[in-house]
Image (tube, helix red, strand yellow):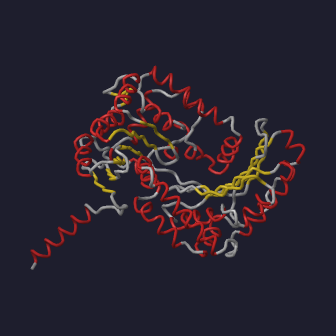
C-alpha cells in the first residue's frame, strides 16, 4: 500500500512538472531542457511555414542609459552573424530561402520572424538560430544602422500625434518614461557601440527568456525534433533576467496635468488624455472590461460618438487601452474641429463624467461590442503567418491562457465589471491631458487660456 502511494505521488509530481499550458486547438507546446519554450501551430491553409522568436525585452527593460537600444538591437539582428559574416551574405540567404522577414520592438516584447516555403523549415530554423545566438556587431554595420534607426525617430517627430504622445508620456511616466518609449533617445542611439549591444544580449537573449513559435503547414512532432536538434544546446542563462534586473513599478500620478504644445506642423489641433490603467499582473479582469467598454464607445450608435463626431465637434474620437503586464495606458485621442475646439474640450469632460453611469452604454451596445471583438479575433486567425506574433504578445504581456480564453472572457464581461473598471482607473483619478496646436490657431482659439482641468 505504501509503495502504491509513493508511486502515485511521483506520478503526480511528474504530471505537474510537464503540465501543458492551455492553448487553442492544433497548438502544441514543449519546453526544452534549456528553458526554451516551443509552440508549434499546425495550420495547412497555405504551403508555408513561419518561425518567430520572441524575447521578453523592449522598452520596459531600459533605463535612460539604454533608451532605444532594444530597438537598435532588433535592427542589428538582420546584419552579420557567425554563419553569415556580413549583411550581403545574410540577405542573399534570405533570397535563397524565399523568406519574407521582419522584426518589431514594443514596450514588453521584441520579436523576429521569417516566412518561407514549408520545405525550408530545417534551413530556416538554422538561419534563425545563427542570427539569434551568434550575432556579430561590426562597427561599420552599426555606423550604417544608427542613422537608419534615428531616421525612424526623426520621421516620427514630423507627426503632431507623435509630438503629443511623447510630451504626454514624459508626464505620465515621469522618470521611468524610457521604459514606455521603444523608439528611444537620439543621443543614446547615435552613440551606441558593439559593447552596448552585447550588454543587451547578455541580459535577455537566452532560451529561458525566449519563445520559439513554428507555424504553418508543419507537423508538430517533426518541428519539435528540429527545434531540439538546433536549439537544444543554446545555453541557459542560469538566472531569471527579470529577477536579476527587476522592472521598477510605475509611480501613480500625484496630480492632474494639462499642457498646450505649439507646433507649426500641426495643421489641425490634436487632443489627448492619458490615465494609468490596469495591468495583467494585478487586475486582468479590468483589462478585459476596458476592451469591451472601448469597443462599445467606438460604435457609431454610442453616446460618445454621437456627442463628439455626429455633432461635428471632432472628426475622430478614439478611446483605447493597451494590454500590458506593467500598467497599460488608457488613451483618449481626438482631432477636434478647429472652429469648435472649446466646445469639443467641454463635451469630452461632460462625457467622461458620465462613463461611470451603468446606462451610458446599452445592453445592445454591450453585446455588439463583444461580437465585434469576436469577429476581429476570427479575422486575425485567417492569416497563419500572423498567429505567432499574436501568441507571443500574450506570452510576454500576460500568459498563454489569457490569450486562449480571451474571447470567452470577453463574453462574460458585465456592466458591473465596466463600472468597476471606470471607477477604479478613470473617475476622479489623476491623468495627463495635452494639446498640440499651431501658434496661429492657439492665438485665434484661445486654447492656452481655456485648456485647464475641468473634470
Number of on-image labels: 0
Q: Is residue 328 above or below residue 79?
A: below
Q: Nearer the viewer, residue 211 or 202?
A: 211
Image x and y of residue 13, in percent: 22, 66
Q: Residue furthest front?
A: 46
Q: Nearer the viewer, residue 321 or 11?
A: 321
443 relative position to 210: left or right:
right
Quarter of the image where one finds residue 155 = top right
Q: Nearer the viewer, residue 92 or 347?
A: 92
Q: Quadrant of the C terminus?
A: bottom right
Q: Is residue 46 above or below residue 371?
A: above
**Residue drawn at the location 72% of the way across and 64% of the way down:** 304
301 relative position to 218: left or right:
right
Quarter of the image where one finds residue 349 = bottom right
Image x and y of residue 119, in percent: 28, 39
Q: Nearer the viewer, residue 439 or 34?
A: 439
Q: Is residue 270 above or below residue 27?
A: above
Image x and y of residue 242, in percent: 42, 50
Q: Quadrant of the N terminus?
A: bottom left
Q: Residue furthest bottom?
A: 1
Image x and y of residue 332, in percent: 68, 56
130 relative position to 304: left or right:
left
104 relative position to 312: left or right:
left
**Residue drawn at the location 65% of the way across and 51% of the way down:** 172
Amino acid at each position: 500500500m505504501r509503495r502504491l502511494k509513493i508511486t502515485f505521488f511521483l506520478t503526480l509530481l511528474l504530471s505537474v512538472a510537464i503540465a501543458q499550458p492551455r492553448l487553442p486547438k492544433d497548438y502544441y507546446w514543449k519546453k526544452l531542457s534549456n528553458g526554451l519554450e516551443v509552440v508549434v501551430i499546425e495550420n495547412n491553409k497555405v504551403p508555408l511555414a513561419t518561425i518567430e522568436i520572441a524575447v521578453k525585452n523592449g522598452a520596459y527593460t531600459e533605463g535612460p542609459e539604454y533608451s532605444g537600444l532594444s530597438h537598435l538591437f532588433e535592427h542589428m539582428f538582420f546584419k552579420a552573424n557567425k554563419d553569415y559574416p556580413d549583411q550581403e551574405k545574410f540577405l542573399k540567404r534570405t533570397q535563397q530561402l524565399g523568406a519574407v522577414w521582419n522584426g518589431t520592438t514594443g514596450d514588453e516584447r521584441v520579436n523576429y520572424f521569417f516566412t518561407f516555403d514549408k520545405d525550408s523549415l530545417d534551413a530556416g530554423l538554422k538561419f534563425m538560430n545563427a542570427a539569434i545566438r551568434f550575432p556579430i556587431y561590426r562597427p561599420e554595420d552599426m555606423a550604417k544602422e544608427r542613422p537608419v534607426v534615428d531616421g525612424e525617430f526623426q520621421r516620427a517627430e514630423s507627426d503632431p500625434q507623435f509630438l503629443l504622445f511623447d510630451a504626454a508620456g514624459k508626464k505620465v511616466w515621469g522618470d521611468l518614461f524610457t521604459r514606455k518609449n521603444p523608439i528611444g533617445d537620439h543621443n543614446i542611439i547615435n552613440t551606441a557601440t558593439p559593447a552596448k549591444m552585447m550588454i543587451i544580449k547578455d541580459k535577455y537573449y537566452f532560451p529561458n527568456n525566449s519563445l520559439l513559435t513554428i507555424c504553418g503547414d508543419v507537423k508538430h512532432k517533426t518541428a519539435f525534433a528540429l527545434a531540439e536538434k538546433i536549439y537544444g544546446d543554446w545555453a541557459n542563462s542560469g538566472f531569471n533576467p527579470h529577477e536579476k534586473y527587476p522592472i521598477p513599478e510605475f509611480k501613480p500620478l500625484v496630480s492632474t496635468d494639462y499642457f498646450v504644445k505649439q507646433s507649426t506642423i500641426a495643421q489641425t489641433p490634436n487632443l489627448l488624455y492619458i490615465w494609468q490603467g490596469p495591468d495583467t499582473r494585478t487586475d486582468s479582469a479590468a483589462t478585459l472590461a476596458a476592451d469591451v467598454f472601448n469597443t462599445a464607445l467606438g460604435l457609431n450608435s454610442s453616446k460618445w460618438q454621437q456627442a463628439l463626431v455626429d455633432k461635428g465637434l471632432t472628426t475622430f474620437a478614439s478611446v483605447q487601452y493597451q494590454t500590458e503586464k506593467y500598467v497599460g495606458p488608457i488613451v483618449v485621442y481626438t482631432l477636434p474641429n478647429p472652429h469648435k475646439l472649446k466646445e469639443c474640450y467641454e463635451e469630452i469632460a461632460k462625457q467622461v463624467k458620465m462613463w461611470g453611469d451603468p446606462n451610458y452604454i446599452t445592453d445592445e451596445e454591450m453585446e455588439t461590442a463583444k461580437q465585434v471583438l469576436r469577429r476581429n479575433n476570427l479575422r486575425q486567425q485567417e492569416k497563419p503567418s500572423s498567429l505567432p506574433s499574436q501568441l507571443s504578445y500574450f506570452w510576454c504581456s500576460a500568459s498563454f491562457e489569457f490569450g486562449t480564453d480571451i474571447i470567452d472572457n470577453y463574453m462574460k464581461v458585465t456592466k458591473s465589471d465596466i463600472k468597476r473598471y471606470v471607477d477604479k482607473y478613470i473617475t476622479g483619478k489623476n491623468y495627463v491631458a495635452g494639446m498640440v496646436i499651431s501658434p496661429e490657431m492657439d492665438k485665434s482659439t484661445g486654447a492656452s487660456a481655456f485648456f485647464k482641468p475641468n473634470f
